[in-house]
Image (spheres, helix red, strand yellow):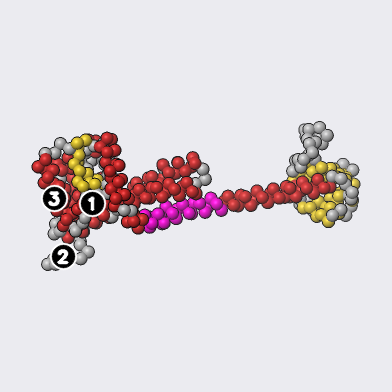
């Protein structure tokens, strides 16, 4: 049952029914029927004096309005001509316009939302896969060394507290390795003051080596045990590669830039934090660092070849690390997955220096 115009919905606003008298013409007929046209709840309803009825949603009707002469055309071709001098005609007119405007507004808003969503997705993809990777390498080079060292100073105590323990390596052994490292850095013509080799007991980290952005390189006791001196130097050359190529800084920049972008374009805070923690983290940590590992491998091979050493020592070290970490769990991407490690080993073994050394 519908409520009548006099009981439930007679409030004086656009939603209240507007009733006008006039003439009803059925589709394709010139015969006139006296009747009423009611606008209520977003629909027109015709009731002719001889009992015929018709109805149609306002959005589907067309209003021809020439001042006093007002006609409402229904989609089936029928029409209602409003009699002149009807007080409710103005409300009818307002109701139709309001509805039409609302429909147009909603349509426009919907289109705007769609455009915004598509634009956001395209923009995000562009930033994530094109702009960001292209931008962070030059940006990372602009970061002053002092800032990078500050990161090391801040994070080393954190590492020590969370995962690392003091090294149990004899002093003589440490001095021997540190000497080899200094020789490596110096031999490559790099700034020795930038680098600091730190010995630690790895605990759950096991055999490992990793570089911090500012040039602090940590090597675990277990790493020095399983690797031969040549292999350890190759591992250190790989870590020097991470520092020289500013991989740590790039990683930090990518993550923080991404967070900023997500805050700027993200639709709401919940989505932002979900995105920030989910997909990009996966992309950045595996996708980006995989490329960095290959770059650092390449750097180490070049460096070792330049110093007249055998780059295959790096492949040997990698092989040992893979055997040492069969579960492929490591804080550093040294051994992230076996197919990948095998591929890296194969690439290193097939390495040929870009410029052949004299006498080859
Ligand atoms: Zn690495």
Q: How far is disc 2 from disc 3 in space, using C-alphas?
A: 22 Å
Q: Can residue 137 be seen in this snapshot?
A: no
Residue highlighted by disc 2:
357
Report if residue 120 lies within the magenta region: yes
- In magenta, the rendered stretch is 115-137
Q: Alpha-carbon neighbours of circle 2 within 10 Å: few (<14), some, or many (≥20)? A: few
| Image-based side of 57 in relation to 198, left or right | right
Residue drawn 49% across the image and 48% down it: 264
Q: Earlier in the sequence, mark 3 or mark 1?
A: 3
Residue drawn 51% across the image and 43% down it: 268
Residue drawn 42% across the image and 52% down it: 128
Question: From the viewer's perspective, is the residue at label 2 or at label 3 nearer?
Answer: 3
Question: From the viewer's perspective, is the residue at label 2 or at label 1 nearer?
Answer: 1
In percent of width and height, residue 291 lies at: 31, 53
In percent of width and height, residue 110 lies at: 61, 49
Asked if disc 3 and disc 1 are in contact, CB closer than 8 Å, the reply is: no
Q: Earlier in the sequence, mark 2 or mark 1?
A: 1
Q: Earlier in the sequence, mark 2 or mark 3?
A: 3
Q: Can residue 286 be seen in this snapshot?
A: yes
Residue highlighted by disc 1:
194
Question: From the viewer's perspective, is the residue at label 3 or at label 1 nearer?
Answer: 1
Residue drawn 78% across the image and 48% down it: 94
In percent of width and height, residue 102 lies at: 69, 48
Residue that lies at the very extreme toward the front in this rendered image: 146
Q: Alpha-carbon neighbours of circle 3 within 10 Å: few (<14), some, or many (≥20)? A: some
In percent of width and height, residue 299 lies at: 23, 56
User: Total of numbered circles in the picture?
Assistant: 3
Q: Quadrant of the N terminus?
A: top right
Residue highlighted by disc 3:
180
Q: Secondary structure at mark 2?
A: loop
Q: How far is disc 3 from disc 1 in space, using C-alphas?
A: 16 Å
């Amino acid at each position: 049952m519908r409520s009548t115009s006099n009981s439930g919905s007679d409030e004086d606003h656009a939603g209240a029914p507007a009733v006008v008298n006039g003439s009803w013409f059925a589709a394709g007929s010139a015969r006139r029927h006296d009747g009423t046209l009611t606008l209520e709840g977003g629909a027109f309803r015709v009731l002719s004096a001889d009992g015929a009825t018709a109805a149609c949603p306002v959005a589907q009707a067309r209003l021809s309005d020439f001042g006093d002469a007002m006609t409402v055309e229904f989609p089936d071709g029928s029409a209602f001509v409003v009699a002149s001098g009807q007080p409710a005609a103005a409300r009818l007119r307002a109701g139709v316009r309001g509805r039409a405007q609302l429909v147009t507004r909603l349509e426009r808003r919907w289109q705007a939302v769609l455009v915004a969503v598509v634009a956001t997705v395209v923009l995000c993809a562009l930033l994530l896969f094109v702009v960001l990777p292209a931008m962070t390498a030059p940006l990372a080079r602009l970061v002053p060394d002092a800032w990078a060292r500050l990161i090391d100073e801040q994070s080393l105590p954190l590492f020590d507290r969370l995962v690392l323990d003091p090294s149990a390596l004899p002093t003589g052994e440490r001095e021997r390795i540190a000497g080899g490292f200094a020789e490596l850095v110096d031999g490559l013509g790099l700034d020795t003051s930038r680098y600091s080799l730190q010995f630690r007991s790895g605990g759950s980290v096991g055999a490992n080596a990793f570089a911090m952005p500012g040039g602090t390189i940590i090597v675990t006791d277990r790493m020095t045990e399983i690797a031969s001196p040549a292999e350890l130097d190759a591992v250190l050359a790989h870590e020097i590669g991470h520092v020289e190529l500013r991989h740590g800084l790039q990683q930090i920049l990518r993550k923080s830039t991404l967070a900023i972008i997500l805050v700027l374009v993200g639709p709401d805070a919940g989505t932002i934090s979900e995105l920030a923690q989910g997909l990009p983290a996966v992309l950045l940590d595996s996708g980006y660092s995989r490329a960095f590992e290959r770059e650092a491998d390449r750097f180490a091979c070049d460096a070792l070849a330049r110093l007249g050493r055998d780059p295959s020592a790096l492949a040997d070290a990698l092989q040992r690390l893979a055997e040492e970490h069969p579960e492929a769990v490591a804080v550093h991407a040294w051994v992230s997955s076996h197919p990948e490690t095998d591929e890296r080993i194969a690439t290193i073994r097939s390495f040929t220096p870009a410029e052949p050394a004299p006498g080859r």
